[in-house]
Image: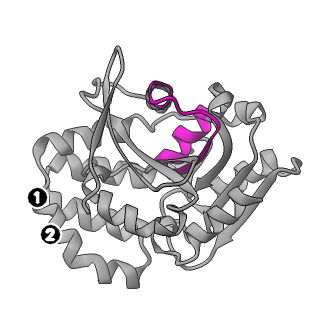
């Protein structure tokens, strides 16, 4: 059965989301930046997270509709938190991947009552100069409005070579369908990552945290995960795990990734 896409309406914006699973524990996924909405992949995501569906009710949030011209990570986080509150969610098990991890960090810092446990995947507490190169490259390609080229270069950055070649035809097919408004939305979200920095606020996080990184992360670099670890590693409720060989998008490619998340949540 196809997953239904829903809309949560607040007093200031609408946000699309979908949910699945029959468990009683609320699990919120905040995906990374994408060229096209992750809502298009609802059925695939539900299939991938089937292992958690008996224990959790799983919510996957998009970014808000009608993006403002300038939209920072902090604003994305506050809007996501507002959407969560509107749906009556609190004490959630939270997972943020890449840009979604940055959003998750801000939610945990500013709205600690919303988060019971948090997993951060391939993310960073700040955007350093050495992390700007991938963002610069994607921004340049998006401005050229060449969907196929953007998808292919995006794929090369986030996947290891062998997986990229497996997905290449699918990436080309997706790129051929990119609309101009989707490209403009991607650019706004991309620019919102610039100047992000919560390194001095990490000590405000109250929930247990698992940071998962990848040594060969070509987007954030493994140093980004290590910097989070350096700030939190004195806490007994902090854990770190580093993958080898899976690329930035290990959250999509590592076969034990969801099992690892579930094990942390159940500890």
Q: Residues within 10 Å of mark 2 (few under 14, many from 20)?
A: few
SS under mark 2: helix
- Residue 207 is left or right of residue 259, and the answer is right
- Residue 244 is left or right of residue 147, and the answer is right
Q: Residue at 56% across / 67% down in the picture?
A: 258
Q: Residues within 10 Å of mark 1 (few under 14, many from 20)?
A: few
Of 138 and 104, the residue lying toward us: 104
**Residues shaded magenta:** 84-107
Q: Can the viewer see residue 94 in this picture? A: yes
Of 213 and 11, the residue lying toward us: 11
Q: What whole-number distance in Å separates the C-alpha atoms at marks 1 and 2?
A: 7 Å
Is there CB contact under 8 Å for labels 1 and 2? yes
Q: Which residue is mark 2?
A: 173
Number of disc labels: 2
x and y, in percent, of residue 134 in the image: 41, 55
Q: From what the image shows, is residue 108 above or below residue 143?
A: above
Q: From what the image shows, is residue 1 above or below residue 256?
A: above
Q: Is residue 94 magenta?
A: yes
Quadrant holding the C terminus: bottom right
Q: Which residue is mark 1?
A: 177
x and y, in percent, of residue 166 in the image: 31, 83
Q: Residue at 46% across / 32% down in the picture?
A: 80
Q: Can the viewer see residue 127 in this picture? A: no
Looking at the image, the residue that sits furthest to the top is 11
């Amino acid at each position: 059965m196809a997953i239904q896409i829903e809309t949560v309406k607040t007093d200031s914006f609408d946000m699309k989301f979908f949910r699945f699973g029959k468990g009683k524990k609320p699990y919120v996924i905040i995906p990374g930046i994408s060229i096209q909405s992750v809502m298009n992949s609802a059925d695939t995501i539900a299939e991938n997270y089937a292992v958690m569906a008996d224990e959790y009710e799983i919510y996957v949030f998009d970014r808000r509709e009608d993006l403002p011209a300038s939209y920072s990570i902090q604003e994305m986080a506050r809007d996501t938190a507002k959407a969560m509150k509107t749906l009556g969610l609190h004490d959630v098990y939270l997972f943020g991947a890449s840009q979604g991890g940055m959003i998750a960090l801000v939610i945990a810092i500013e709205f600690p009552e919303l988060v019971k446990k948090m997993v951060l995947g391939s993310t960073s507490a700040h955007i350093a100069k050495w992390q700007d190169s991938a963002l610069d490259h994607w921004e340049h390609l998006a401005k050229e409005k060449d969907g196929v080229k953007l998808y292919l270069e995006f794929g090369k950055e986030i996947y290891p070579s062998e997986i990229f070649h497996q997905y290449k035809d699918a990436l080309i097919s997706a790129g051929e369908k990119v609309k101009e408004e989707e490209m403009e939305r991607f650019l706004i979200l991309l620019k919102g990552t610039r100047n992000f920095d919560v390194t001095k606020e990490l000590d405000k996080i109250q929930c247990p945290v698992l940071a998962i990184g990848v040594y060969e992360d070509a987007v954030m670099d493994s140093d980004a995960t290590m910097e989070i670890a350096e700030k939190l590693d004195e806490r007994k409720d902090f854990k770190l795990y580093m993958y080898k060989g899976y690329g930035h998008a290990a959250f999509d490619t590592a076969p034990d990734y969801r099992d690892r998340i579930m094990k942390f949540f159940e500890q």
